Image: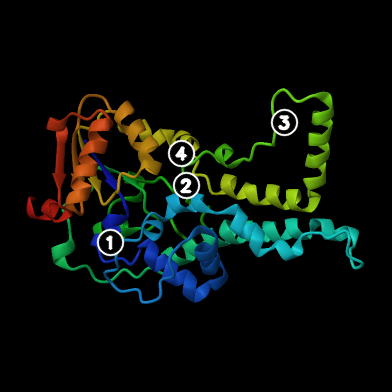
Amino acid sequence: MKLYIIGNGFDLHHNLDTSYRSFGLFLKSKYPVIYDRLIEYYGFSDLDGYTQKPTYDALWNEFEESLSLLDPETAFEAHSGSLANPSSSEFRDRDWGTFSIDMEMVVDSLTTNLFKAFREFVLAVEYLPLNSDSKLYLDNSALYLSFNYTDTLEHYYGIPEENINYIHGKAQTGSGDLILGHGIEPDNFKNEDPSPPDDLTPEQMEMWIEQMSDSYDYSFELGKQELLDYFFRTFKQTKEVILLNSIFYNKIHNVDEVFVLGHSLSEIDMPYFEEITRVINGSPIFTVSYYSQKEHGSHKETLLNLGIKEKHINLIKMDELRKSR
C-alpha cells in the first residue's frame, strides 16, 4: 500500500504558476493595498524587476511562516492619526473607537481579504498541456495527502478524488475556507502588562501606579487588542486539522511505501508528518524528492529526526520517479 504526500514543488514541476512570489505579483496587480501592507508591516520585498529565476527571498518563498512577522508597532504608527485626542476642541466620544476601527480594517485586509485573494489566485492557475517529459509514474490506487489547493492530481493523472485528502482544502468556487497560516502559538504575541519593581515602599508604589495611569491610552489599547487578534486568525491549527482528518489517517496504518513529492518538509507542517510516522505500522520506505543539494541535506536530517532509519530513506530528484519506472 502506497501513500503519496504532495507539496507545491509538485505543481511547479508540472509548470503550474503557484509560487508565492507569483501570488505576490497577483496581489500587486489586483490588491495593491494588501500588497503594500505586506511590504510595510512585514518587510516583504517589493517584486519590481521580478524575473522567472529570482534570487531566493525568504519572506516570499516561506510565505506562510512569514505571516507571523507582522510588526504591530509599524501598523500602529501608520494609523496613529486616528488615535483619540480628548484635548482637541473637535473631540467627540465616538473618536475613542476610531483607532480600533482602523485596526479592525487592517486585520480584515490581512486575513479575510488576503485569503480570498489567495483562493482567487489559485482558481486562476492555468493547466497547460502536459509535456510528456514532466509526467511522473503515480499509482492510481494509492492514497494521496495533498498540501496543495489545486486539482493537479485529478487533472493530469486521473487520480480518483476519493483517494485524495486535501489537508488544507481545495480551491473551488463556493467551497469552504482554505487553511493558510503560520505555526507560532498566538499567546506568544501577547504583551505582558507592566509590573512594578520589587521592594517598592508604599509611597513609591503609589507613584508608580500614578505614572502607569498617566501613560494609559484607552483609544490605543482598544486598537491594540483588535490588532493582536490577527495572530489568532492567521494561526494554522494543525492539531485541529489532524483531528478533522482522522478518518484519512486511520486508512494509512498499513502503508509500506511513502512518496513525498515537492514538499519542503517545513517546520510548520511537521505535526502532520509526526502523525503519519506515528500511525503507520512497521517501517515503510520513504522516497522523498529534493530540489537542491542543500535541500537534500536538510530533508535527510528532518527525516532522521522523525525517527525514520537511514536505510529506509531514499532521496531522489523528482524526474527520477519518471525515469526509474
Q: Quadrant of the N terminus?
A: top left
Residue 239 percent location from the top left of the image: 47, 34
**Residue situated in front as seen by the camera: 51 or 85:** 85
Q: Which residue is mark 1?
A: 12
Give whichever of discs 3 and 4 has the lower sequence position. 3
Nearest to viewer (mark 2 / mark 3): 3
Amino acid type of disc 1? Answer: Leu
In front here: 319 or 253? 319
Q: Which residue is mark 3?
A: 196
Q: Earlier in the sequence, mark 2 or mark 3?
A: 2
- Gap in angstroms between the C-alphas marked 1 and 3: 55 Å
How far is disc 4 from disc 2 in space, using C-alphas?
A: 10 Å
Cβ–Cβ under 8 Å for marks 1 and 3: no
Instruction: Tell me what residue is drawn at x 51 percent, y 56 percent.
Output: 175
- Residue 94 horizontal/vertical position (percent): 86, 59
**Image height of 229 relative to 120, above or below:** above
Element type at mark 1 = helix
Residue drawn at 11 percent across, 52 percent down: 320
Q: Contact (CB < 8 A) between labels 2 and 3? A: no
